[in-house]
Structure formats: C-alpha cells, structure tokens
Image (spheres, helix red, strand yellow):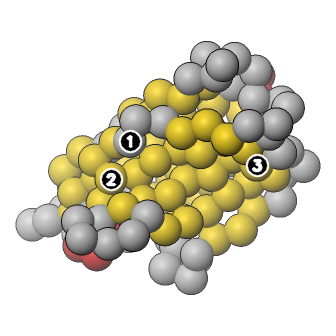
Amino acid sequence: QVQLVESGGGLVQPGGSLRLSCAASGSIVSFITMGWYRQAPGKQRELVAFITSGGSTNYADSAKGRFTISRDNAKNTAYLQMNSLKPEDTAVYYCNANGRSAYWGQGTQVTVSS
C-alpha cells in the first residue's frame, strides 16, 4: 500500500505561483503515470496534468502554458508548478498514481483570490 501526501497549497493572489508536491511512501518508479487532478466546489474532479514513467507529459487545456508537472524518482515525489494562477484555478488538488493499483492523496487546497 502506497500513501501519497500532497503539500504546497495555500492562498495566493491572481498572477501568483505555487508549487505542489506529492510525496509517496514508497518508490514511484513502478507507477505508469503520476498525475494531478482538481475539484472545485460543486464540480466534478478533473484532470490537470499527468506524467508517464518515461517523462512524457499531458496537460488539460486550462493548464497548458501555465502549469508544469514533473517527477523525481529518487525522491519519490511528483510536483506541479503552477504559474499565472487565476481565480478559476481555486480547487482542492489531488495527487494520483497509477500502476497495478490506483492511489490518491488526501488533497491540498489552492485558493486564488485578491
């Protein structure tokens, strides 16, 4: 059983930046993909970005050009660098890891507001 723990969320002004981290309790090398999802109040959870074990990345249209996903296998950690944040980016952000099983973190709140 792998546990994922997100951190790095918080309150930021529009145009600001945050870097989310997802620390796994075990090795992430075997995970085919690691991804970030978000869920805003009253909305369904949606994919923000994912990265494959080979380093290929995929982004939601809303994240392209502003967010960057990365993974550090040596640190068993995935990251989401978020720049030029907008109020519509406000949501709980969840880390996801997919391998033989799927794992989810508990989420971290991101609030973009002036």
Please, what secondary structure does the residue beneath circle 3 have?
strand
Residue type beneath disc 2: Val
Q: Amino acid type of disc 1?
A: Gly
| On-image quarter of the C terminus | bottom left
The picture places residue 24, in percent across and down from the top left corner, at: 61, 24
The correct choice, above or below, for 38 with respect to 15 in the image is above
**Circle 2 residues within 10 Å: few <14, some 14–19, many ≥20:** some
Picture coordinates of residue 2 (x, y %)?
A: 64, 22
What separation in Å lies between label 1 and label 2 (alpha carbons)? Answer: 6 Å
The residue shown at (75%, 62%) is: 57
Q: Quarter of the image containing the N terminus? A: top right
Q: CA distance from mark 3 to mark 1?
A: 18 Å
Q: Nearer the viewer, residue 33 or 74?
A: 33
Q: Are marks 3 and 2 in contact (CB under 8 Å)?
A: no
Q: Assess disc 1: are there few (<14), some (14-19) or many (≥20) residues with their C-alpha within 10 Å of its C-alpha.
A: many
Pointer 3 local density, CA inside 10 Å: few below 14, some 14–19, many at least 20: many
Mark 1 or mark 2, which has the lower sequence index? Answer: 2
Q: Amino acid at mark 3?
A: Thr
Name the mark on residue 75. none
Is residue 37 visible in this depiction of the protein? yes
Residue bearing the label numbered 3: 33
Compared to residue 37, the image places residue 65 above or below, namely below
- SS class, disc 1: loop
Using the image, tell me which numbered label, if any, was put on residue 107: 1
Residue 53 left/right relative to 26: right
Direction from residue 3 to residue 9 in the image, left or right:
left
Q: Residue at position x 43%, y 64% from top?
A: 45
Q: Where residue 17 appears, x then y in whole percent?
A: 36, 56
* Side of 99 where 86 appears, left or right: left
Q: Disc number at residue 92?
A: 2
